[in-house]
Amino acid sequence: MSDMRPLRKTLLAMAETDQRVRAELVREGTLFLGYHPRMAEVHHRNALQLTSIMDVVGWPSPEMVGTDACDAAWLVLQHSIGDPAVMRRGLALLQAGPPNAVAPAQLAMLEDRVRTMSGLPQRYGTQFDWNDRGELAPREIEDAEGVEERRRAAGLPPLAEKLSEMRENMARAGQRAPSDFAARRKEIEEWEVSVGWHS
């Protein structure tokens, strides 16, 4: 196999840029005011680069680039929300690939994100949003009775524990429920349609 060090370096740099820009926007207090253009630009640029990588090597596995760079590739994929084809392709590669390509929890989070953005219920309860009561809550879950069993199998903590953690994080970051839930939901759905998640 050819030298994968340049690919490893590229993946780590992509994830570093993502996290650096996110941290800057958190400090400015602007990250949660819709999909920030700076964040969207980083996500899109990274998605295009990840597409080129997948064209050449498929999924950059831990054996190929190391666990940390593989995790970086997953982060880039998980944040490619403006590029549905990239997220769906990455999910398909990971589902078809060796079981150790990413952690089961990472695969569960990716599957849930693709499903919820496609207008489908999630399976593991990893995707959260504000509800019409002004509370942060999991988005719709398919077979909600079996969610804890699926979460355990994927190495995820109990849903109530994760929800408590998410609410604390949101409060610490100063994120508040939208004043008009219906308008926010409509805006999100219109954006999902505009980038091709669903019609």
Image (spheres, helix red, strand yellow):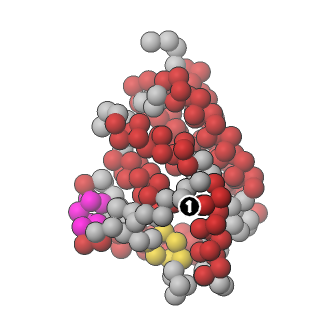
Q: Which residues are magenta?
A: 146-152
Q: Residue at x 54, y 69 (%)?
A: 169
Q: Where 164 falls versus 61 (above or below)?
A: below
The one of 104 and 49 positioned closer to us in this rendering: 49
Q: Residue furthest front?
A: 199
Q: Main secondary structure of the magenta part?
A: helix
Q: Where 157 falls versus 86 (above or below)?
A: below
Q: Which residue is mark 1?
A: 199
Image x and y of residue 87, in percent: 51, 46
Q: Quick check: is 150 in the magenta stretch?
A: yes
Q: Residue at x 75, y 55 (%)?
A: 37
Q: Quadrant of residue 172?
A: bottom right
Label 1 crowd bin: few (<14), some (14–19), many (20+), radius 10 Å: few
The secondary structure type at the circle numbered 1 is loop
Give the number of callouts: 1
Image x and y of residue 98, in percent: 31, 33
Image x and y of residue 29, in percent: 73, 67
The one of 104 and 54 positioned closer to us in this rendering: 54
Residue 39 visible to an observer of this rendering:
yes
Q: Residue furthest top?
A: 2
The N terminus: image quadrant: top left
The C terminus: image quadrant: bottom right
In the rendered view, does 23 fall on the left or right side of 63?
Answer: right
Q: Residue at x 60, y 47 (%)?
A: 83
Image x and y of residue 82, in percent: 62, 51
Type of amino acid under label 1: Ser
Q: Quick check: is 113 in the magenta stretch?
A: no
Q: Residue at x 49, y 59 (%)?
A: 118
Q: Residue furthest bottom?
A: 133
